[in-house]
Image: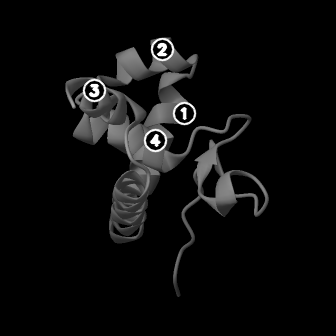
Amino acid sequence: MKVETVYQHIVQTPDIVGGKPRIAGHRITVQNIVIWHEHMGYSVDEIATQYNLTLAEIYSALAYYYDHKQQIDESIKESESFVESMRQKTPSLLAQKLYERAG
């Protein structure tokens, strides 16, 4: 028998942030919390203060992440690939202007 874990502060709604797990009452996803905490090095207190979240909400998001690590990590990689693809397709206006001025 598999026991279902309940994450009190985490919800998924199909039409909000693409159905990604997020903090209830916010459009802040578990993925956002992971990037800020694990990749950018923000402390839990910094995230709570900057985004007006409770520590319980953040720790619930991190618990959800560690229980679904592979799924969230894949989602992060997909997002990074999408951003890189868009970056390559869309030239930088600043770089273009600098090139024009130099030429």
Q: Amino acid at mark 4?
A: Asn
Report helix, strand or loop for mark 3: helix
Disc 1/disc 4 C-alpha distance (Å): 13 Å
* Residue at left offset 66%, top offset 39%: 27
The label nearer to you, 2 versus 1, is: 2
Disc 3/disc 4 C-alpha distance (Å): 33 Å
Q: Position of residue 4 (x, y in %)?
A: 57, 70
Q: Which residue is mark 1?
A: 57
Location of residue 4 with respect to 55 vertically, above or below: below
Q: Which residue is mark 2?
A: 50
Mark earlier in primary sequence (3, 4): 4
Q: Which residue is mark 4?
A: 32
Report helix, strand or loop for mark 1: helix
Question: Mark 1: few, some, or many residues within 10 Å (few <14, many ≥20)?
Answer: many
Q: Which residue is mark 3?
A: 98
* Residue at left offset 79%, top offset 59%: 15
Q: Amino acid at mark 2?
A: Gln
Residue 26 vs residue 88, the one in the foreground: 88
Question: Mark 4: few, some, or many residues within 10 Å (few <14, many ≥20)?
Answer: some
Q: Quadrant of residue 24?
A: top right
Mark earlier in primary sequence (2, 1): 2
Residue 19 shown left or right of residue 48 in the figure = right
Disc 1/disc 3 C-alpha distance (Å): 45 Å
Asked if marks 1 and 4 touch (Cβ < 8 Å), the reply is: no
Residue 57 shown left or right of residue 78 in the figure = right
Q: Amino acid at mark 1?
A: Glu
In this orientation, does residue 94 appear? yes
Mark earlier in primary sequence (1, 3): 1
Disc 2/disc 1 C-alpha distance (Å): 13 Å
Q: Amino acid at mark 3?
A: Leu
Q: Position of residue 8 (x, y in %)?
A: 63, 45
